[in-house]
Amino acid sequence: MKHSRSRPPADTTAAPAFDHEQPIYRQVYLRLRDAILSGAMLPGQRLASSRALASQFGIARNTVLQAYVQLEVEGYLQVRSGSGHYVSQLRPPAPAKPAHAGRRGNDASQHQAAIVHNRLDFVPQSLRHSIPAVPFRVNHPDLNLFPIETWARLQSRTLRDARDAAQIGSLLGEGDAQGDRSLRRAIADHVSIARGSQCSADSVLITAGAQHAMDMLLRVLTRPGDAVGLEDPCFPGAYSAARAADCRIVPMPVDEQGARLPTKLPAGPAPRALLLCPSKQFPLGITMSLPRRLALIDWALRSGAWIIEDDYDSEYRFDGKPIPSMQALDGGRNVIYVGTFSKVLFPSLRIGFIVCPAALIEPLTAARAISGRHGSTLEQRVLARFINDGHLARHVRRMRAVYRERQEVLLEACRSALSGRLVVERAQSGLQTMAWLRPGTDDQHVAAQAQQAGIALAALSRFRLQTERAPALVMGFGGFDAASIRGAVRTLAKLDF
């Protein structure tokens, strides 16, 4: 009879020759990551303890711990309580088959393919492909209620107003990488009134949405290996942008007051930037308290760090007035404000914006120029008219009432059909809310069951960086009418959880 034996701790070989071009923790991280991806370290293998590896490499133990934490955050390692660090069950990319056997360069092409896979495999499917609009998809507005006739009328008027060659060329020719001035002026007025932000048209840059804004900002503000603070649990778009910029991720636990810096920051330079959703943290839905906002702004000023404020879901606050944006509190010194019209109006309108200090406008405009050149001038001018004529404010007021009512339908339906199995929170704003499961329930299993039944649920554990939390689901209600919500809840009630 054969007896299975656990694999011994992974052999990380002799101490490497460290250089001084990049942090030592990062060189350890890259060495271990490459060994995992190449198959030199196998899934399930236990790594040497941080103390043993530090002694072997002749470096500080904290340096090794920093590398281990980064590998754990990125999914290469798993921690087993009381047992140590183990290589995760990764599925490496299948080796490419050469088109012609023996052709030179095949090894190089496979190497390049492995690099591409490694740099992009963290991008979730929800960002790569469209998701079916079924209950309870998150971040999904009701497109049937968008005033499409008004939009069409404004577009026709914008085209008609281009009467001579110069006007036609301005409208249909190449645009400014910073964005059309009419829209930048309209946005500056809008956020000054709605969010108290201090800005002018010259401090606004138009992007292809909030995701594009985060990607550009991290590429401009950070260098590979710089630390970046991310909320834990984390919005997948922020995580993907940080990974794509090759940043070192510092998880920021979220409590009842919002995100906070860890009690003890990892060894090395302080985070170069913090990516925050203070208006409504995704996925937990917590609004960051004013004291926490002020504390983080103070830390950023003292540390010379940037705060990237994604003003997620600030428009649809159901009760009371929203807390001023962090950019307004900061006075535009270290806080960069990011907004988008994709959820307020319609997702295919890829128009977002950045409000930033004057010193960043030129480098960000350059980054915009090489990452898409410029957006559609026609769409930007139509949106500027939509804002200036008051249609945006009216649409937001109307939809705020609709979404408030739909949340009530969801709460009542779940109380009636899922009492004792699911506790749904009342969200203060936005298009989705949290639904807490019974302790010990596997939220990813419940989400998979729901998917088989034609329902979209997001498991809270999918957004975790480090912090363990009670099992829960994120339920979107904004894009679905009362009948659809009630029907989907009845379907959920038939599932075994």
Image (spheres, rainbow, N blue to C red):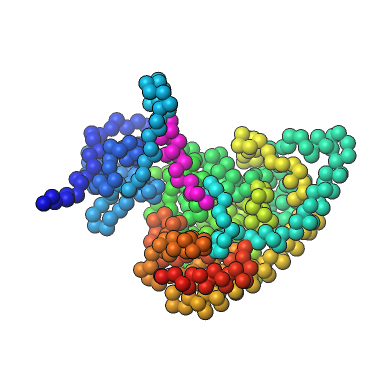
Spot occupied by residue 455 in the image (x, y as percentages of width and height): 52, 63
Q: Is residue 49 left or right of residue 470?
A: left
At x 62% / y 48%, what residue is drawn?
A: 209
Res. 404 visible in picture: yes
Q: 430 above or below 301?
A: below
Q: Quadrant of the C terminus?
A: bottom left
115 inside magenta stretch: yes
The single residue placed furthest to the right in the displayed view is 163
At x 44% / y 69%, what residue is drawn?
A: 495
273 inside magenta stretch: no
Camera-side residue of 246 and 10: 10
Spot occupied by residue 468 in the image (x, y as percentages of width and height): 38, 61
Camera-side residue of 214 and 436: 436
The single residue placed furthest to the left in the displayed view is 1
Spot occupied by residue 210 in the image (x, y as percentages of width and height): 60, 49
Res. 237 visible in picture: no
Q: Quadrant of residue 166?
A: top right
At x 48% / y 60%, what residue is drawn?
A: 451
Q: Quadrant of residue 391?
A: bottom right
Total marks in image: 0
The span shown in magenta is 112-126
Q: Is residue 251 left or right of residue 455?
A: left
Prevailing SS of the magenta stretch: helix
Spot occupied by residue 23 in the image (x, y as percentages of width and height): 38, 37
At x 49% / y 64%, what residue is drawn?
A: 453
Camera-side residue of 452 and 177: 452
